Amino acid sequence: MLYLQKGNFQKVVRSMGGSWMTSNQATFFGIIFILLTASGYYVGLSREGFRWVLLLVPVFLFMRLAMNTLDGLLSRERNTATVAGEIWNEALDVFGDTICYGSLLLVPGVPDKPVILFLILTWAAEFFGVLGKSMPGGMRRHETFGGGKPDRAVWMGLVAVILVVSPGFIKYFSYYLIFVSILVGLTSLIRIRKIIQAARGKEYKSYTWIGK
């Protein structure tokens, strides 16, 4: 799984930040690449003569992941991590995917139902990943069956390239998204299973703002 390469990826990404970049700057650049990814899909698929723009989508997706990783690295390295920062980071993961891939809903001819299914399952996978932190034995779950955030970036970057090389593949785009959605759904199931396993044998207490 791609997440197992996180250590190597972090080494590469850290060199991009040098000594000048702050975690807030990394977050800002990450947002820029989210918007560039969304624009790349929309322009490349809906503007005649601009299909080549889709070739930039994998680059934008890589840079989005790099900035997201760099944000956390710099925060921990410089001891500037905060609760608010973590909330913002997790929210940006979900909203970032929604903006990146939700832009496909604006493209004429792209079936909306598979895109919506993909987005809903993406939200679920991220939700269960975060939920693991609030359970006994809690930790942020990153297990994946080819449907984690880095995996999704690879699948969606790949299809952008395919659509440049073979524009007719758009006819099969629905099936492609359904296939990727299945992987994302299985990722959620794996994370749920890991949460339950980690909590086994440990005391569980549930609280709300009004008490138990």
Image (spheres, rainbow, N blue to C red):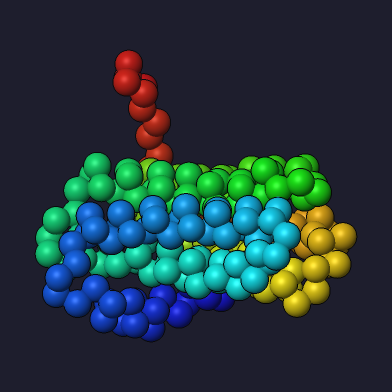
Q: Residue at x 18, y 62 (%)?
A: 22
Q: Quadrant of the C terminus?
A: top left
Q: Could you say which is closer to the camera, residue 169 or residue 81?
A: 169
Q: Position of residue 208 (x, y in %)?
A: 36, 23
Residue 113 lies left or right of residue 124; in this view the side is right
Q: Residue at x 28, y 61 (%)?
A: 26
Q: Position of residue 94 (x, y in %)?
A: 48, 47
Residue 63 lies left or right of residue 188; in this view the side is left
Q: Residue at x 41, y 48 (%)?
A: 92
Q: Position of residue 136 (x, y in %)?
A: 39, 47
Q: Could you say which is closer to the camera, residue 21 or residue 43?
A: 43
Q: Could you say which is closer to the camera, residue 98 or residue 73?
A: 98
Q: Could you say which is closer to the camera, residue 75 or residue 195?
A: 75
Query: In the orientation shown, which residue stands out farthest toward the top?
Result: 210
Residue 83 lies left or right of residue 196; in this view the side is left
Q: Position of residue 173 (x, y in %)?
A: 80, 60
Q: Quadrant of the N terminus?
A: bottom right
Q: Which of the 4 image quadrants contains residue 27?
A: bottom left
Q: Residue at x 85, y 62 (%)?
A: 172
Residue 174 seen by the camera: yes
Residue 43 lies left or right of residue 169; in this view the side is left
Residue 201 seen by the camera: no
Q: How many marks?
A: 0
Query: In the orientation shown, which residue stands out farthest toward the front?
Result: 49
**Placement of 91 over or under 148, stated as above or below:** above
